[in-house]
């Protein structure tokens, strides 16, 4: 099997107590780290990663467009209501083409996530199943006893555009919906037998609808979902975090 050269972050998961093959289920750790967020008039999805014991919140840049560089406040849906969530810094990848934004927080992790360093020997395989998580249609997902889990969809790893290594684009055969933007794309690494974060959902590739006129298909101005999910490599988020930690802090 040919492997993609996408740089990913591997995460070992503590599985829920179900007797299933690991690669057929979405790990509970990813579910609990995925959040329904809003900023201004936009709503979408974000998920937590950690770096050196500190929590960072990753989402799509367009979901939080206009967020200030420091002390941004976004809202997170918790316990059936919107709650203000205060951040420390807003971080972006070096390329403006990458639709990813990262928020540094003052949260710490009591038990660090088991994220391994980048390993080019691993990687997702063309044609394998992936999952993408989010909160479509105004926060649709699992609700139980003040607990909120994202909606889960699956797709096929179809293509990658790495002509620009500063903005690696992922294409997945999977029907995405508004609200998934900023959510995590997850896969099972068959080489390392671990779940990994592959990327961040940007949206979907649009197509124009067609109508049949006198036996001829004509394009319309109506844009429709092509069924191709577009995302960006998680590497860009982690690289932005690493670079930000090297910057001198104002005193």
Image (cartoon, rainbow, N blue to C red):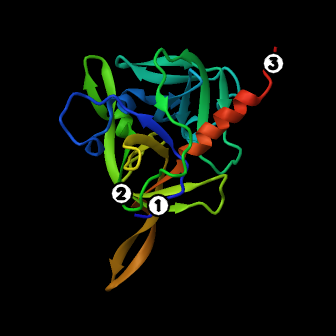
Asked if residue 42 lies left or right of residue 28, the reply is right
Between marks 3 and 1, how big is the CA–CA gap?
43 Å
Mark toward the viewer: 3 or 1: 3
Q: Position of residue 83 (x, y in %)?
A: 47, 17
Q: Mark 2 — residue?
A: 128
Asked if residue 92 lies left or right of residue 147, the reply is right
Crowd band around label 3 with a 10 angstrom C-alpha radius: few (<14), some (14–19), many (20+): few
User: Which part of the image, by quadrant, shows the N terminus?
Assistant: bottom left
Crowd band around label 2 with a 10 angstrom C-alpha radius: few (<14), some (14–19), many (20+): few
Mark toward the viewer: 1 or 2: 2
Between marks 1 and 2, how big is the CA–CA gap?
23 Å
Residue at 45% in and 35% down: 45
Q: Mark 1 — residue?
A: 206
Q: Nearer the viewer, residue 106 or 115?
A: 115
In what element is the residue under mark 3? loop
Residue at 30% in and 17% down: 146
* Residue 250 to residue 134: above or below: above
Within the image, what quadrant is residue 217 found in?
A: bottom left
Q: Mark 3 — residue?
A: 250
Q: Which mark is residue 136?
A: none
């Amino acid at each position: 099997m040919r492997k993609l050269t996408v740089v990913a972050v591997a995460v070992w998961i503590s599985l829920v107590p179900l007797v299933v093959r690991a690669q057929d289920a979405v790990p509970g750790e990813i579910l609990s780290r995925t959040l329904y967020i809003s900023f201004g008039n936009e709503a979408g999805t974000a998920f937590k990663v950690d770096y050196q014991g500190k929590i960072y919140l990753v989402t799509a840049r367009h979901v939080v467009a206009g967020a200030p560089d420091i002390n941004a406040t976004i809202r997170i849906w918790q316990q059936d209501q919107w709650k203000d969530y205060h951040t420390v810094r807003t971080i972006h990848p070096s390329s403006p083409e990458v639709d990813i934004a990262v928020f540094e927080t003052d949260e710490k992790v009591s038990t660090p996530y088991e994220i391994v360093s980048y390993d080019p020997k691993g990687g997702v395989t063309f044609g394998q199943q992936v999952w993408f998580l989010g909160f479509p249609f105004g926060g649709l997902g699992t609700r139980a006893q003040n607990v909120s889990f994202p909606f889960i969809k699956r797709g096929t790893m179809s293509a990658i555009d790495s002509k620009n290594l500063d903005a690696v684009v992922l294409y997945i055969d999977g029907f995405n919906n508004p609200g998934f933007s900023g959510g995590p794309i997850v896969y099972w690494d068959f080489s390392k037998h671990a779940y990994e974060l592959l990327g961040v959902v940007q949206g979907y590739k649009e197509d124009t609808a067609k109508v049949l006129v006198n036996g001829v298909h004509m394009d319309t101005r109506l844009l429709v979902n092509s069924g191709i999910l577009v995302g960006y490599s998680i590497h860009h988020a982690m690289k932005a975090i690493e670079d930000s930690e090297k910057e001198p802090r104002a005193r």
